[in-house]
């Protein structure tokens, strides 16, 4: 645990509205000599859907509810039935509804990311130099990594291409 003081203090700040200051690989390199082998193995295999590790089970419960609400509202918007039962959370429903009504998918992802960061901050709570902080940081980094896959220009080009194809079909009728 003593090595966590240096590790957590040396990690760059992660912000929902910012870029990735370090890669997940760089983060793992920093952790390798500062955490136990078992903790490192959990970090190395960590995904957004993981369920093992400090803080991770609490995160998994929240993230599962968020994904189910997204699926539910998307199904309803498409006029399809959603057959899976799940515990509904009013606040998650509001956030998802706001995200789905965003101007574009990137804005929706950013809105969800901000909410996920807030939830992680509340899960970390008053923990300062322990596994909760390390795993919370790792999950935030994974979330930013996911967001960095969205390329606005490439997405717009794909949308324009699809839209042009639709227009040509409509005009040919």
Image (cartoon, rainbow, N blue to C red):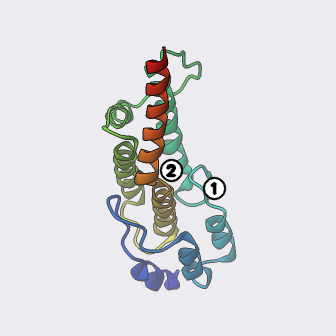
Pointer 1 residue = 52
Q: Residue 29's spot in the image, x, y percent?
A: 59, 80
Q: Where is 9 relative to 88, above or below?
A: below
Mark 2 residue element: helix
At label 1, counting other C-alpha atoms closer than 10 Å, the crowd grade (few under 14, some 14-19, many 20 or more) is: some
Q: Is residue 149 visible?
A: yes
Q: Residue at x 47, y 26 (%)?
A: 168
First in sequence, mark 2 or 1: give its number.
1
Is residue 93 found left or right of 81 in the rendered image?
left
Circles 2 and 1 in contact, beta carbons < 8 Å: no
Corner quadrant of residue 107: top left
Pointer 2 residue = 59
Q: Residue at x 65, y 68 (%)?
A: 44
Is residue 83 found left or right of 117 in the rendered image?
right
74 or 94: nearer the eye?
A: 74
Direction front: furthest residue: 172
Corner quadrant of residue 133: bottom left
Q: Residue at x 39, y 81 (%)?
A: 9
Q: Where is 12 relative to 69, above or below?
A: below
Q: Residue 5's spot in the image, x, y percent?
A: 44, 83
107 or 49: nearer the eye?
A: 107
Q: Is residue 76 visible?
A: no
Q: Residue 113's spot in the image, x, y percent?
A: 39, 51
Q: Residue 95's spot in the image, x, y percent?
A: 34, 37
């Amino acid at each position: 645990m003593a090595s966590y003081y240096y590790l957590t203090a040396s990690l760059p700040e992660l912000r929902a509205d910012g870029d990735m200051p370090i890669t997940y690989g760089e983060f793992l390199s920093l952790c390798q000599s500062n955490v136990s082998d078992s903790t490192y193995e959990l970090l190395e295999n960590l995904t957004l859907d993981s369920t093992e590790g400090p803080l991770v089970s609490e995160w998994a419960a929240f993230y599962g509810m968020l994904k189910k609400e997204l699926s539910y509202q998307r199904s309803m918007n498409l006029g399809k039935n959603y057959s899976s039962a799940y515990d509904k959370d009013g606040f998650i429903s509001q956030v998802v509804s706001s995200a789905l009504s965003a101007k574009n998918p990137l804005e929706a992802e950013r809105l969800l990311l901000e909410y996920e960061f807030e939830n992680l901050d509340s899960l970390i709570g008053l923990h300062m130099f322990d596994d909760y902080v390390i795993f919370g940081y790792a999950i935030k980094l994974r979330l930013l990594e996911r967001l960095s896959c969205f390329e606005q220009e490439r997405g717009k080009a794909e949308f324009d291409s699809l839209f042009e194809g639709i227009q040509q079909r409509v005009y040919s009728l």
